[in-house]
Image (cartoon, grey):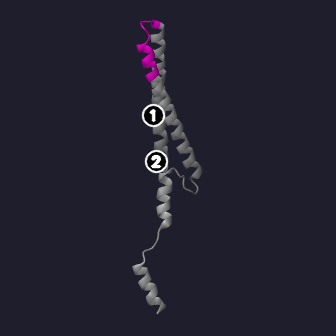
Amino acid sequence: MTSIITILSSIIVPSAYAQGVWRDYYTTFGGSGSGKYFVVDVAIRGANFFLMLITGGAILAIMWSGIRMAASGGNEEVKDNAKKTVQYALIGVVLALMSQAIITFTSNFFGLISF
C-alpha cells in the first residue's frame, strides 16, 4: 500500500529543484558561486568593474576636453592641452577595451566562467 502511495505522490506532486533555481538567481545578481573557481570568478568580476570605471573616466575626460576646447576662446595653449587630454583618454579607452578582450578570451578559453 505504501508503494502505491509513493508512486502516486511522485506523479502528482512535482519535485522541487530549489538549488538549481537559486543558483540561477544568485549568479544573475552577482553571486560568484562556489567551488574551486571562486577566487577566479571574484578576480574577473573585480577586473571588469575596474575596467568599467576606467572607461567611464576616459569618456568623462573626453567630454571635459571638448568643453575646454570649445570654451578656449582662441587660446592655442588651452586647445593643445585639451587635445593631449583627448589623446590620452582615447589611449585609455583602447587599453581598457583590449584588457576586457583579453580577460574574456582567457576566461572563455580555459572555461573558467561564461558571461
Residue at 42 percent of width and 77 percent of height: 13
Q: Is residue 77 magenta?
A: no
Residues drawn in magenta: 63-76
Residue kind at label 1, given as amino acid type = Leu
Q: Secondary structure at mark 2?
A: helix
Q: Is 2 placed above or below 110 here? A: below
N-terminal of the pair, mark 2 or mark 1, is 1
Q: Which residue is mark 1?
A: 97
Q: What type is the residue that disc 2 sits on?
A: Asn
Residue 5 has which mark? none
Q: Position of residue 59 (x, y in %)?
A: 45, 27
Residue 65 found in image quarter = top left
Q: Marks 2/1: CA distance? A: 16 Å
Question: Which secondary structure type mostly characterizes the magenta part of the structure?
Answer: helix
For label 1, count other residues whose C-alpha is less than 10 Å away and answer few (under 14), some (14-19) or many (20+). some
Q: Residues within 10 Å of mark 2 (few under 14, many from 20)?
A: few
In the rendered image, residue 64 lying in the magenta stretch gets the answer yes
Q: Say above or below: 76 vs 27.
A: above
Tell me what residue is drawn at x 51 percent, y 36 percent: 51
Give the image location of residue 33, x and y in percent: 54, 55
Q: How many marks?
A: 2
Residue 47 is situated, as x and y percent measured from the top left of the image, at 54, 40
Front residue of this view, candidates 115 and 7 = 7
Residue carrying label 2: 108
Percent position of residue 81, x then y: 49, 13
Residue depth check, mark 2 versus mark 1: number of the one nearer the observer? 1
Query: Is 26 drawn above or below residue 96 in the view shown?
Result: below
Instruction: Report which quarter residue 90 is drawn in.
Output: top left
Left or right: 31, with 9 as reference point: right
Q: Residue at x 43, y 85 (%)?
A: 7
